[in-house]
Every structure is written in C-alpha cells, then in structure tokens.
Image (cartoon, rainbow, N blue to C red):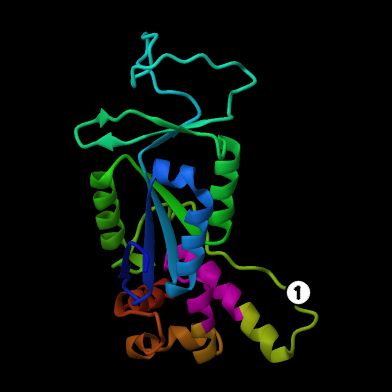
Amino acid sequence: MSDYWFANYEGKRLQFSRKQAGELVGNIDEAEKQLADYYNNADKNYQIVEGIISPDRLKIKGASVPIDGHGTSVSTRDLGAKLFCYKVEPGGYIEKGHSFTAVNDSLLYAWIHRLAEAGIVTYYTVNWVGTAKLLSAIYRNEQKPPENHSTLQRIIRPQFYIRTEKDMTDTDRAEFRFMKSLLFLSNAYQLGIGEKKARAIASRFCNILDIATASVRELTDIEGIGERMAIKILASLGRDV
C-alpha cells in the first residue's frame, strides 16, 4: 500500500508515496521499486519528498561555517558528486545534514523527470506539517470538476491530437470534425470540454445544431456533463436556459 490515498470527485483513486530527503537519496533504487509496486493500484500516482536536498552544505549568508557546524572544503572536481540532505523541524529548525554519494544532483533531476514522464508527479515539502497541508489542499482541489477551476484557463487549451483524415471512414471523419468543433467552442467559451467529453457528446449528437436544440436533461444524460456545464453549453449556442 502507498502512504496516503483518496478518491477525487469522479471516484478515481489518487495515491501518494512519502519519503524523507535522505531516505530517497540514500536508496533511490528502493524508492523506485516501491513506486513500481504501487503503480497499478491507483489512477494517479504522486511522490512527496520531505526536507531539503542540496549539492552544497547549507550556510548562513556571510558565515564561513555551514549550519551543521562542520567546516568543508570542496574542490571544483568534487562539485555535484555529493548531495546533502536536511530535515526541517516545525518552527524552521534544521537538523544536522547527511551527505550521500550514491547519486548526484544531475542523476536525481533526470530520475524525477522520468517519473513525471511515467505519470508520477513529485512534490517537495519541508516537513510533515507541509505534507499535511499539501495533501489537504490537493484533496479539496480534487473534489471539484475541471470546469469549476479557474487556474490558467486563459492559457491552457484543450489538448487534441490531430490525426490525418485520409484513412478514416466517412462516419469517423464526420465525428472527428464534430469533436474539433466542440473543442473550439469550449476554448472560446471556457466550457471545460476535453477530448473525452467531446467524444461522449459526439456519440450522442450528430452536429452542433442537434446540441443547440437539445434540453438540459438530454445533455446531463451524457457521462461527465453536469447541469451547470449543460447550461453553459446551451448558453454558448445562444439558448436562454
């Protein structure tokens, strides 16, 4: 089992693996094995890393001695060969750091990137208090459908991967063009329709005119379309609902 999990507004399971900075850097292979073991147990996977990871010992600006009280001399050849990990107690107290040579910062960054490519997002918190706040914020955020969020709505555009139409049947081509029209409509009026919902609508209606003459009930019968979204769709087509 992962360390934490909960369901979002659709009932999809989100799970989180929690690691201390030193625990992760000290045995990155074990961390990856655990992520792989849990991967198929949820719809979305996340990793939380607590603490501070730095290629240099932390120092107070203007002081010659690092915060852990130990002097250090590092040649340019050694830079990036070690990672220093620190625990941060509530209140901002930093415990004595530990150094690790198993991985360097470049390898760690590449590993984090590959996790993201595999769908595992990594969050960083300073301690367990930050982790609790992070989980609480994500839980509340995930209880709302996408159309109820305003973050980056003016920047993010619905993703739609353009296929060539030459190999499509006439039926597939008509559905494909209809879906593109729905996505453009959604983009213009901020309707929150993505490819999945566009496909569901296209499977129920033949064209935009069919939607414009539909009732709210007919739209809400489609999976993923709530009453609020149905009203917004009809309003974007000139209907006074």
Asked which secondary structure carries label 1, the reply is: loop
Q: Residue at x 41, y 87 (%)?
A: 222
Q: Nearer the viewer, residue 171 or 143?
A: 143
Q: Residue at x 37, y 30 (%)?
A: 97
- Quarter of image, res 214: bottom left
Q: Which residue is mark 1?
A: 164
Magenta-highlighted residues: 178-199
Query: In the figure, 209 relative to 190: above or below?
Result: below
Magenta: main secondary structure equals helix
Q: Nearer the viewer, residue 223 or 212?
A: 223
Residue 63 in the image, given as x and y percentages of width and height: 36, 9
Residue 96 in the image, given as x and y percentages of width and height: 33, 28
Residue 203 in the image, given as x and y percentages of width and height: 53, 89
**Residue 181 seen in render:** yes
Looking at the rendered image, the quarter that the N terminus falls into is bottom left
Q: Residue at x 64, y 80 (%)?
A: 176
Q: Nearer the viewer, residue 46 or 187?
A: 46
